[in-house]
Amino acid sequence: MQLEEFRKTKEKELDGYFKNVYQEILDLEDIPCEYDLGERVKIFSDISDKEKEKIISVARNLKPWRKGPFEVFDTFIDTEWRSNIKFDIIKDSIDIEGKKVADIGCNNGYYLFRMLDYKPESLVGFDPSVNTYLQFLYINKFIKSDIKYELLGVEHLDEYEEKFDTIFCLGVLYHRQDPIGMLKVLRNSLEKDGEIILDTLIIKGDEDICLCPAKRYQQMRNVFFLPTLVTLENWLKRVGFKTVELITTKETTTEEQRKTEWIDGRSLDNFLDQEDSTKTVEGYPAPIRAYLKASLKG
């Protein structure tokens, strides 16, 4: 679907199924606030309990909250993912001052808000989910940042009018049926000597292979390829990245991903074998993630 045509379908979603909660966000009072962009993105101001309850009721209407955490006027939005753990892993590899930055699959913008303190020239988030876009609008109603949120997916980057110095792609690659094709798109969306920071699911091993789940992985139908680290590095070099730096690998545990009152659904503990947590319910290896930095600069 053409980029502009896709944008129009998203506008219809906003004006249709999501119209009421979208209007609730627009109708929130313009309250002068302070904020703290630490591991828990905090918004605070001296407001009445009545004002606070109105604001928090909108947040409840925006569930499920997957990425965070946030604290809005003393209310802790305990998101499914403690995304601060992932940010702590990559923060020493972030060099974006004065640069044009994109976050592909940005969800509600948690990582983008955290990146504001790094003083980039611009921040653009890409995610086609209207619900997470509304969560971003809700938080940004009070932070009032210049972050731009595009209701677009990675498949629209080829048509996008701008290229970037740094692209973050966290937790997206394994959802794509053509991972090498996606990495090519990311490469083509970079300025000369640009770089990506990537996190994706992998499997252990030293061979040039990958796991292709038969039907589901952790109950997800949209997980297609889990490479070994060797294979992942080969993919990156094959599409034109000159240097590939491994930041770390990390097992995903219930310390990082778990069910909370802000998602009203199942989480990691439900997706692992109850008798052997080293396996998923389907019998595949439990999730391990690789974090890498790849550059076009030789």
Image (cartoon, helix red, strand yellow):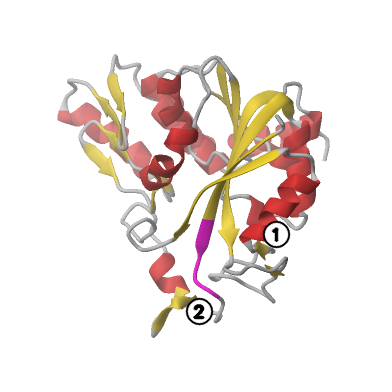
> Residue drawn at (73%, 39%), measured in percent from left and top?
241
Q: Quadrant of residue 53?
A: top left
Which range is magenta?
A: 285-289
Give the structural element (helix, strand or loop) at label 2: loop
Question: Which circle, 1 or 2, is nearer the viewer?
Answer: 1
**285 and 141: which one is in front?**
285
Q: Quadrant of residue 276?
A: bottom left
Residue 76 percent across, percent down from the top left: 25, 42
Q: Quadrant of residue 75?
A: top left
Please tell me how crowded label 1 is: few (under 14), some (14-19), or many (20+) other residues with Cα within 10 Å: some
Question: Residue 38 vs residue 285: left or right?
Answer: left
Residue 31 percent across, percent down from the top left: 30, 17
> Residue drawn at (36%, 22%), measured in percent from left and top?
142
Say if the magenta span includes residue 288.
Answer: yes
What mark, if any, has residue 44 been given in the picture?
A: none
Give the structural element (helix, strand or loop) at label 1: helix
User: Which is nearer the N-term, disc 1 or disc 2?
Assistant: 1
**257 and 153: which one is in front?**
257
Q: Main secondary structure of the magenta part?
A: loop
Q: Which residue is mark 2?
A: 281
Is residue 180 at all visible to an observer of this figure? yes
Q: Determine whether 195 is above or below 32 in the image.
A: below
Q: Which residue is mark 1?
A: 231
Question: Label 1 amino acid?
Answer: Thr
Say if the magenta span includes residue 230.
Answer: no
